[in-house]
Each structure stands twice: as structure tokens, then as C-alpha cells.
Image (cartoon, helix red, strand yellow):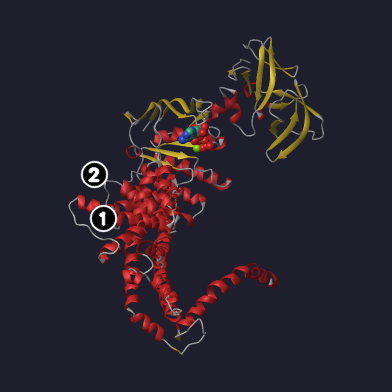
Amino acid sequence: MKVVLEHLTKRYPNRNKKEGGEVVAVGDFTFEIPDGKLVGLLGPSGCGKSTTLNMISGLTEPTEGKIFFGDDDVTKLPPENRGVGLVFQNYALYPHLTVMKNILFPLQNLKGPDKLTKEEMNARALEAARLVQIEALLDRKPSEMSGGQQQRVAIARALVKMPRVLLLDEPLSNLDARLRLQTREEIRRIQRETGITTVFVTHDQEEAMSISDVIVVMKEGYVQQIDEPQNVYDDPVNLFVAKFLGTPAINVFEGHVAAEQLYIGGEPVLRVTGVPDQDVYVGIRPEGFVPDEKGNFGCGVSRVEVMGRDTSIIAENSACISGQIRAIISSVRKIDKNAASVRFSLLPEKVHLFSKETEERIRFRE
Amino acid sequence: MGKSKYKGWLYLLPAIVFLAVFMVYPLVDVLVYSAEEGYSFASQTYTGTGLFNYSYVLHDPYFLQAVKNTFLIVIITVPLSTGFALLISLALTSIPKLKNLFQTIYFLPYVTNTLAVGLVFMILFKPTFYTDGMVNLLIKFFGGQAVDFIEGPYWAKMFVMCFYTIWVVLPFKILILTSALASVDQNLYNAAKIDGTSKSRTFFRITLPMISPMLFYLIITGFIGAFKAYSDEVALFGTNLNVAGMNTIVGYVYDMLYSSGGGYPSYASAAAIMLFVIVLTITCINLMVSRRSVHY
Ligand SMILES: Nc1ncnc2c1ncn2[C@@H]1O[C@H](COP(=O)(O)OP(=O)(O)OP(=O)(O)O)[C@@H](O)[C@H]1O
Ligand SMILES: [Mg+2]
């Protein structure tokens, strides 16, 4: 089932009486989540991800806007009637109940024509447990399990009632790096197997990139960009998105465009056809640097890190405003580790220009 | 290894000494007194040893009355006060707006002197030369007959006694239960809401188990407190509780110790030991029940 958000807005009254006014937790969020897709809601802490999720689940009432599940307007529907499964950031398992009873809990709430017999309930619960591979743990209490296992129980509990929409609020944030990788693959597999439309909240861009069909990047309550993961990376709409996605982060420089030529620190580094003369921010992805003796872009070398497949050159340039420059090149290329300086030529598709005033993207032809 | 063992005991020493001097020694002493016939503080003499003191106390109608009173107070006030406290706490928790104000109001009796509260109850219940007391005025207004709650029939006195006891212990229980309710993870309620859990099921399957440790704490301390009741009785019925027929076990012990003519420390000790055994038994049963029903 598709989920449609129309001008969804949540404002909270400002507690700080002096400032007055209202805090916009989520502003004018319009988006259609396609049926059976996994959407990653990505943004820094406090940008309104949880608020958006809670509005979809019905726990939070929107100030403005509408929510549709398929063609039904569910904006005014209480959470219990929406048929959503929600996995909380801290799992919120019932600590006094065993795993089995936790998973059974939503089924035991069903009334009227949906009411299930004991056997049906047990069968459904076992099926959900099997899906997340916790059949062996059914008699445990939540406190007797690892974070990853608890997390899977939470997913099973959310799935067992066959929700129309599955919502996950930073479900991996409590896990260690290894388990996180493993569990996110599992979530992906479960989502594919069940085909349930899913919204996955995270502030980890790598997680969002790897798991999502579509990424929504948010900042301070407002949507910045909605696109497929690779497109968001390759084609960011503004400096915020460019900086937020990618590890190592994009390198940002002060630059200047004159006569369709881009200058960084006085050096003409790239032809940028179609850009009027102005000061700009230049974002260059780490993989956009190509060591080239005849290259136009010169930097002082701080150090060279060889890490298996890749080599990182940590360099310095006075025009760089994002700390040190990090360039990643294939370790097949031999680099003189003791060189004091290095010259690069730039890959145009890895170079993005942003307006100095609005920080919006300025596109150019090569 | 050996050294660190000593160190641990060294740290415990002040507490152990304190407990030994003020708890263990008196307890043993009381046990000894209870087995010594006709012990007298003044002359430090006794006439024989044995279980005579216990036999005397158990045949003393005042003691039997005190035991009956104490058990009645315990059985009536502990469940009622805990139940009321739970209801009031739930109500308080569900009204976020005036919660703090009401919490303060409910807490007032706790910080008020027992005797002052007793005075208020006297005004409410005691008929005097001028008036029948507030409650009797109400009863009469509705066409009933005035009852002397302070010096009248036993059930009326017991009613006032229990009412008073509940009133006095309620604030503390409300305080504990409201904070227990507030500390239940809000996400559990959100999860229950998402799962379409009914209000009553949420209460019985989530709220109650989550606050059960606190509930049992209140029940256990409530039992102990009610068994040790004494000052509340004095506040309502004066110091001559035996005559009023409202004495408690602790009151009996006190009367035996300080009655005119030097008192009867042996009888007092025997009664105190019996109270100790009763409280110990009930507390053990309580703990066993709570072990079985507190789930995590
Ligand atoms: N009940 C509330 N009252 C007032 N402001 C709130 C309330 N809930 C959230 N906010 C504000 O709304 C904004 C968005 O909050 P939200 O919880 O959605 O952030 P988030 O993106 O989930 O962050 P995180 O990654 O830290 O979980 C924040 O600035 C927060 O301070
Ligand atoms: Mg959040």
C-alpha cells in the first residue's frame, strides 16, 4: 500500500516565552511513498524524523496536512485503527513478558471478526518468529537477550499483525557496528519477503544509502531532497545534502567563477560552462581528485594513508573550509609518500558548485 | 586477598557495632526478660524462669482484645489504603494540568502532626455538649441516628480508627505510586496503543506488572506499619486504650511497661516477642508471594 503525505506539518509551541512563536518540528512534508518500497528518512538529530514517523503512526497529531494509506484518509484515525507496525528506537518490549508473549500481545488485542483462536495466534507468532530467526528464544525475557535479538523481537511484534505499513525509528542505533550491518541486511530481507511498505528512520547516511529504495533527506523540519540513494550522492541539490552524504565527507572550498572558469585559491581548476561570474562554494568528492603532474590544482601533502584497496592523501589548501582535504585514489597508483606537495586534476562529475548566498546547487556543463 | 577481606569488615564495622548495640542486644535482652518470671527493673530480681509470662499474656483479655484490634486494623486498612492510593495515583497521572497542585494537597496529611490530625477527627466525629460532631450532623441530615464514634459502640470506634489510619498512610502511598507510574516507560504505552490494546488490558497487563515491585513494597511496609500501630489510637481515644477497648499490641506492650507500680517488663517482653514473631511471619509470607508474582 502506498502512503501519501500531503503538506504534513507539526508545530510545537515555543517554551521559551521571550522568543515566542512556534517551533516547526516538521514543515510542509509532501511525498508519496510507493507501494512495497523501503524509504529511508535521513537527517541530523532533531530534524523531525521521529515526529514524521509518529504522525504516520498516529501517535502524534499533525498541526496541518493529511496522511493517506492507499486511498483512505487516515489523518484523524487513532493509531490502533491504522494497522501500522512500529519498531521503537529502544524497542519498547514488554519487559515482564517472554518473547512469545510479546509477539502474541498484538494478536490478543484483536476483537470481533478479526478475533483469532489460540492455535491461529500461536501459528502466526511462530511464523513471525521464524521470519526474524528467533524461534530458539521464545521463552526468554527481553532482559535475557542481546540488543540485536531484542531488536528482532520488536520487528516480529510489529510484523505479526500483518501491518499495512511498517515504521522503524532508528532501530539499529543501539547495536554495535557488526550487528548493525547484519541486522540491516536482515531488515532489508524481511522487507523484501513481506513486501510491506516501510519507512526507516536513521541519522546514519551509510545505513540509509545501503538499505533504502528512496532516501528523504531532512534538515530542521524541512525536506531537502528525495531521490534514489545514488542520485542523492551524485546529484545533491544543496550544500547541506552534499555534506551530509558520503564518508569520507565531501571537501568544501571557497571558489570563484570568472569567464566560465572555476578558480580555487587563484588557480584555474575547471571549465564550468554556463555559470555566470560569482563567488561560490566548491564541493569535491574525495574520489574526484586525480593525481596529475600537469594538473591545475596544487596542495601541500600532510600525510598519505594506504588502506588496502585505497590510498588516502590528506592534503592542505588555504581555500579549503572543511578542515583537511581528503582525496581517495586507487592504491594501484604509486604515490611518493614523501612529496611535500601534490597536483591534482579534477573529475568534473565529482565537482559541485553551490551559491554562496543560498547554498543551492549551481549546475554547469563541462 | 586476606587483607582485602579484613578491609571489607573494617568498613562494615561501624554499622555492625551500631546494629549490635541498638538492635541485636535489646532483642536478645527482651527475649531473656520474657522468660524471667516477675522481673523487676528496680531490684533487678526475678522469681523463676519459664514460659509463664507467655501463658499469662495469652490469657489476658486485654491482650486478646489488642490482638483482635490490631488484626482488624491490618486487614482492613492495608488493602483499602493501597487500593485507594492506586486509584488516586491513576487519576492524578491522567490529569497532567493540576497534577502538582493535587499532589501537594494529598501530601499535606503526611507532613501534618498525627495529633493535629487526630484533633480534626475528634471535631469530625466526637459528640460534645454543644454539638454531635460534623459527621453526626450529616447522618442526622439524611435521617439517620447519631452515633458516638469516640465512646460509643465498638464498630463505630473501629470505623473511625480505620478511616483515620487510611487517611494518615494514604499520602505516602500516593507519593510512591505516582512516581512509580511516572517511571513506566512511555514507549510501552505507545507500543500498546499502536497494537490496539484496550484501556483495561493496558492497565492489567502493562501498568500493574510494571509497578508491582513498588506495590509490594507498599503492601509489605503497610503490613509492618499497621501491626505497629499505636500513636494513632492514642490520638483518637486517649491514653487509656484498654478501657476504650481500642488497644493494640504495641499499646499493650507500652501499658505493661509503664503501668503504675514499676510496670511488668516480663509480660511486656513476652507480648513484644509475640508481635515480633507475627510480623516476621507475615513479612516472610509477603515476600514469598511477591517473589512469585513480581516478574522481573
Ligand atoms: N513534544 C515536543 N514539544 C516541543 N518540541 C518538540 C517536541 N517533540 C519534538 N520537538 C522538537 O521537534 C524537533 C524534531 O524532533 P524529532 O524528535 O522529530 O527529531 P529527530 O529527527 O527524530 O531527532 P533524533 O535523531 O535525535 O531522534 C526537535 O527540534 C524537537 O526539539
Ligand atoms: Mg528521533
Q: Are marks 2 and 1 in contact (CB under 8 Å)?
A: no
> Residue A81, image x and y in percent?
32, 38
Location of residue B6 by image quarter: bottom right
Q: Secondary structure at mark 2?
A: helix
Q: Is residue A125 visible?
A: no
Q: Residues within 10 Å of mark 2 (few under 14, many from 20)?
A: few
Which amino acid lies under the numbered mark 1 shown in the image of this protein? Asp
Q: Quadrant of the N terminus of chain B?
A: bottom right
Q: CA distance from mark 2 to mark 1?
A: 61 Å
The residue carrying mark 1 is B132
Query: Looking at the picture, do discs 2 and 1 lie on one chain?
Result: no
Q: Residue furthest front?
A: B129
To which quarter of the image does residue A286 belong? top right
Q: Which residue is mark 2?
A: A113
Q: Secondary structure at mark 1?
A: loop
Is the shortest distance between ligand 1 and the CB of mark 1 under 8 Å? no
The image shows residue B196 at horizontal and vertical percentages of: 33, 43
Report the chain holding disc 2. Answer: A
Q: Is residue A110 visible?
A: yes
Vertical arrangement, residue A202 with respect to residue B170, above or below: above
The structure residue drawn at horizontal position 34% and vertical position 36%, both measured from the top left corner, is A78
| Residue A255 coordinates in the image, percent (x, y) | 69, 18
In front: B65, or B218?
Answer: B65
**What amino acid is labelled 2 in the image?**
Pro
Q: Residue at x 33, y 34 (%)?
A: A77
Please state if A108 lies on the left or on the right of A258 as rendered.
left
Residue A144 in the image, given as x and y percentages of width and height: 48, 57
Chain to which mark 1 belongs: B
Number of numbered discs present?
2
Identify the image quadrant of the C terminus of chain B. Answer: bottom left
Residue A90 vs A45, above or below: the answer is below
Above or below A338: residue B206: below
